[in-house]
Image: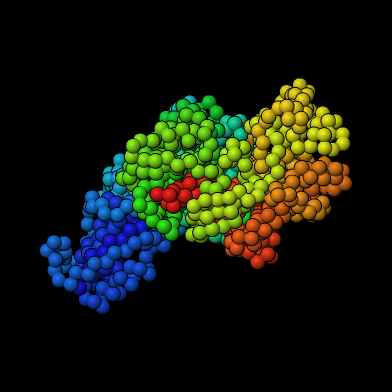
Amino acid sequence: MLSRIIIEGTIQGIGFRPFVYRIAVKNNISGFIRNNEDGTIEIAAEGTKKDTDIFLHELYYNKPFLAHYHNVQIDKLHNKDSHHNYQYDKFLIFPSSNNRKFSFSMIPPDISICNECLADIYNENDKRRFQYPFTSCTQCGPRYTILKRTPYDREGLSISNFPVCDECILEYNNPNDKRFHSETICCKNCGPKYFLIDKKGSNINTMKQLPLISKLIAEGSIVVVKGIGGFHLITSAFNYESISKLRSIKNRKNKPFAVMAKDIDPVRSFANLNSEEEKLLKSYIKPIVLLSKEKNYYLSSLLAPNLHSIGVILPYTGLHNLLLDNNDSIMVVTSANSKNQPIITDNSEAVKTLSNSVDYFLLHNLDIISRSEDSVIKYVYDKISILRRSRGYVPNPIYLNKKSKTCILALGAELNLTFSIIIDNKCYISNYIGDIVNLENYFYLQRSLNQFFYFLRQIPKIIVCDLHPSFNTTRLAYNMKNSGNIIIQQQHHYAHILSLMAEYSIDEIIGIVCDGAGYGDDGSIWGGEILTSNKYRYERSGHLMEQPMIGGDKATSYPLRMVVGILYNKVDQFENFIYDKIHYFPDGNKEVEILFDEIIKINNNKFKTTMTTSTGRILDAVSSLLGICYERTYEGEPALKLESAALNGRDVLRLSPLISNNILNTTILLQNIYENKKRFTTKDLAYSAHLYLAKGLAEIAIEKAVTTGIKKIGLSGGVAYNSIITKTLSEIIGNAGIEFITHENTPPGDSGISIGQAYSALFIE
């Protein structure tokens, strides 16, 4: 019995060919297996019906844990077919073929080092891999970040620059070895190497580089370390001076840093974690997981100032483990790029950019082909919520319930950007690009697009971008316009909801979309929306009250401006309150006088300003009104600190949502907070603000669900990361007998927008 099998999915670069070889030999199957250029795997299997059935059963049910089958095509060829020329007396692993039949089937993401390879690194008897940081096998190591071309063979990887030694060749050809056909196989004798230099560029020659660098880190030195997807800045998590210096290097006044610990035990000493968070930390993805600080949190206060959480990551490479093995320290680990710049991947660029700022460089000579930042995840009301989907996820696609007839490209918004490409029913989401606010990131976006289309061998026929006319991604879309494609502009918040609909494969939903800003159909800034949505269209069914943003984007950076716009002439002694905060306005008295003059003109319809329904701006205003945060130095800072201040608070205001024509009044919320500042604690007032917004949004959404008969209400947008609002919405909506859904496999923030944009094009092709 002869079978020809083509498998499409995540099956290259995960030890799949060795797996198939072993089950074929075990079951007396002759034939071959090979990689195809389109990312598929081709198998010819000949044996008795009984042996073939057992072989196919194992192929389906015993596959490697990273394998994912999207499509399996089996052709039974009962007689010898000269056309296929499948005549073998044993099973072989063939060289790769340039066959291309299916749309591209991606290789897996980078995989954290496995326990078996870690054991080799710590085995003193293994002279070739003892303390060798690049140790890997078929089940672990870099994949996407070192891929130059497909199929996934050593020749297409940057590690091909290092010819394999005779001993590695023996392992590569040994079916009983865990490195049987491991394309990243290497050892001390033939593989890449680390080298240590000082900030002047001089090599530090020592046989004990890693113990030395660990000691230097523990003592407070700042070290640039080249990893698998870019460079990290690393220093001690206890040293106040080095963390302060790190903030200066990164131009990062308050934004939190993540820390890396050797294993779970030290994490428990400074953070609370449940079994699911622990499982995620230990997973092959090894993301940064945001954990609640333990009551007796003892790490530096500079790491995550005025926040209740701390980002934690476990070591995912051999080098990380060795660095942490040589001391008991916990390390600060952050990307080495400057603010709003792409991750550094080149040794010379790292030295040139950072030599005047850091103490040492720990570099290696394996080329990084694709940048990849650490993924970031938090649990929100006991569900995974992805903040940044990158290393460990990319380039794995998500699978949709509808096939595309053509290639669709979606460019996202402008901040926290990813792009998405739909081919067939697969949506490929790019690595995290960041904010497209300068030329460097704009060019990085273009290079990443070119790379993805090179891998996919596709040209987009539909390009989707945001509705905002001034976004750089909108300009890019129109720069890509030609006679062979069309451009679609999609409203920001509808794209948020569509990404949720794509994840859950649903046809209609009442969407609650809460974020900082998005360009509305009417040209104003939206951000607190109730959208009655299906796959083809949406209706704006409710929203927060419009509030003035005096000075436009400056009100985002200095949220007291929002307070002035909302409360001026509506509460007693307000001007005195603002003058008491004069030092929180960059231009002092002059600025405040101008603000008062402008709001008077706005209220008298003599001056126009930007209006917004943004939930983020309301949370920011409450944060500054309560004295929690007066300046936004990173995205979401005032709102994040407000959430931290509100934890375990009480709803002391007990405000019933004031709703008129499906518009939630937010002025009354700030009035009540202002008038009760001396009566109640900051914690309780902060908590009350969250509940008022959640209750009001839930009330409008439930009413729309009841009148339309739609069975699901979903939450999207950056505010979905807020645990208090998400929990309150879930409870109220659930108690009303309506299903409440949130994102789990796609980011609810702007880095998930491209998914919804691309999904929208499926229904207007």
> Residue 656 location, x and y as percent?
78, 54
Q: Nearer the viewer, residue 296 or 66?
A: 66
Residue reaching furthest to the top? 590
Q: Nearer the viewer, residue 384 or 308?
A: 384
Q: From this view, report whether residue 176 is shown above or below residue 449.
A: below
The residue under the point 76% across, 32% down is 603
Q: From this view, report whether residue 293 is shown above or below residue 568.
A: below
* Residue 559 appears in the rendering: no
The residue under the point 61% across, 48% down is 540
**How many numbered discs sit on the rendered protein?**
0
The residue under the point 49% across, 54% down is 535
Q: Nearer the viewer, residue 595 or 237?
A: 595
> Residue 269 location, x and y as percent?
65, 54
> Residue 150 location, x and y as percent?
30, 47
> Residue 664 location, x and y as percent?
72, 48
Residue reaching furthest to the left? 82
| Quadrant hosting residue 526 | top right
> In this rendering, would 472 be left or right of 23?
right
Q: Quadrant of the N terminus?
A: bottom left
> In this rendering, would 444 be left or right of 95?
right
> In this rendering, would 651 be left or right of 738?
right
How has the structure been colored for display? Answer: rainbow
The residue under the point 25% across, 62% down is 43
> In this rendering, would 91 be left or right of 547?
left
Q: From this view, report whether residue 714 is shown above or below residue 228.
A: below
